[in-house]
Amino acid sequence: MIRVQELVKAYRGKRSPSVDNVSFEVGEGEIFAFLGPNGAGKSTTAKILTTLLPPTAGLAEVAGFDVVRQSRKVRENIGYVAQSTGIDYFMTGRENLMLIGRLYHLSGATLTGRVEEMLRYFNLTEVADDVCAGYSGGMQRKLDIATALLHRPKVLFLDEPTLGLDAQSRIDLWQFVKRMNTDFGVTVFLTTHYLDEADRLAHRVGIIDRARLQVVGTPSELKDLLKGDSIALNFDADGAERALPLLRSATFAKEVLEEEEGLRVYVDNGGETISDLIQLLSAKAIKIKAVTLARPTLDDVFIKFTGRSMDKVEEKVKPWWAQWAGDNWEQMEAQGDWQGNQWMNADGSPKDENSFKDWQQTQQISPEAVTDPQVTAAEPGTENEAPVSENQDSKPATPTDGAAAPAPSTGWAGNEWVNADGTPKDPAAMAKWAKEMGAGKGSK
């Protein structure tokens, strides 16, 4: 269903390709997980396969069609759920599905039937006519996937589908992915950095790191590459450096890998070997801080092929209102000074209190003006611009240089309608406001 041969994606100005000579195949009806850390090349590969990015070199086919020469045919046969949601937060769930259905040229009874089918399938019927801004993260993600399944594609691409969801929502979504793979016979291409997600969901896993595909196989096959048990060792001071040559020369050690916080030793029988290992290190006065014995996991496989642990990977998740803000938010985050939201943490506290105070004095901003984490400083060159009114935009107004920040709004405009973590202050009132705005009635 998917065929990739020697795929390369290089960007002008970058020293190394984002995708470097990647080759793999995905069979019909298979759930294939592309596992790797942030920046490994997962999303770039997915965007090439969904025709959103042209490859620099190599071949890529989806559902039998070339992604470059037959891009229209590819799009007719795929569904795509990106990392950032594609739903409109100010429309209801039903309205989102109807809109996407029309974009797929569905209409009449066919469209209505498909919409109802997706609402039932993803347990969204009761909230179908609620504004999506009031949905939980899991509900928003299920609606995202529902929109991608409306036209009954042969291949579904899920790019980090559970990123930012709580544990229970992730498990619920896994069950839906498994069900739709069986019920609809859809082939699923899943990018993820969650080891348990790849292990529990995928028929086969491809591990990608630093733009290169390292290994492909079923979760069991990959773990069987590391026969025996895994012993993780943490040390104080220079313990790992001193222990490394000793363990590599030990007869019981099949393989020894270096980690950020210690060493990992692979042995045939951990229960019988661990006492010999401790005795060996103790004889050389090497103190062990912690010992963990376990069967090999996908993280062990990742360590073997990349030299580092996936457990150290961190993904940055933006709240939905920041994703909705689009490029303006990205530009604001990219600034290297204290302007915009650079000077605050998610809870509204300064990232660096001393630097923030210095910046505050140079900008002549009163302390009272910045106690609300939603208030931002003026950007250079905007001193004479009038702040945007509540009815003009839903983004926070920018105070002029040297002036106190405006008083908090009494309506839902600006960022007044969200807490610091991005959750609505009053979901019901916000949903009502969003629905009125969508109907052109203005803010309350």
Image: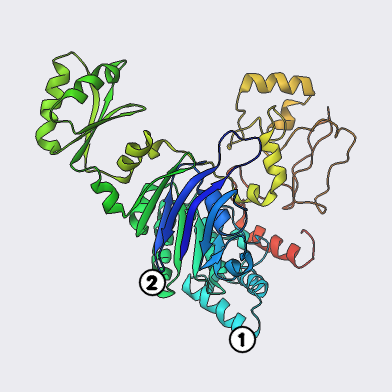
Please identify the quarter of the rendering in which residue 241 is found. Answer: top left
Q: Is residue 138 above or below residue 228?
A: below
Residue 153 shown left or right of residue 357 in the figure: left
Residue 381: x and y in percent read 85, 32
Dot 1 or dot 2, earlier in sequence: 1
Viewed as shown, does residue 352 lie left or right of 245? right
Q: Nearer the viewer, mark 1 or mark 2?
A: 2
Q: CA distance from mark 1 to mark 2?
A: 25 Å
Residue 396 seen in this snapshot: yes
Marks 1/2 in contact by CB < 8 Å: the verdict is no
Residue beneath label 2, please? Answer: 182
Instruction: Name the element at disc 2.
Output: helix
Asked whether, in this view, residue 8 is left or right of residue 173, the answer is right
Give the residue at x 68% y 61%. 90
Secondary element at image label 1: helix
- Residue type, mark 2 in image: Thr
Q: Nearer the viewer, residue 159 or 57?
A: 57
Residue type for callout 1? Ala
At x 70%, y 37%, the residue is 332
> For residue 30, which quarter of the picture?
bottom left
Q: Quadrant of residue 293?
A: top left
Looking at the image, is 210 positioned above or below residue 439? above
Q: In this view of the protein, which residue sits in the foreground, 18 or 149?
A: 18
Name the residue at the right extreme.
Answer: 384
Q: Residue at x 24, y 42 (%)?
A: 226
Tell me if 361 is positioned left or right of 54 in this view. Answer: right
Mark 1 closeness class: few <14, some 14–19, many ≥20 residues within 10 Å: few
Circle 1 residue? 109
> x and y percent of residue 167 in the render?
41, 52
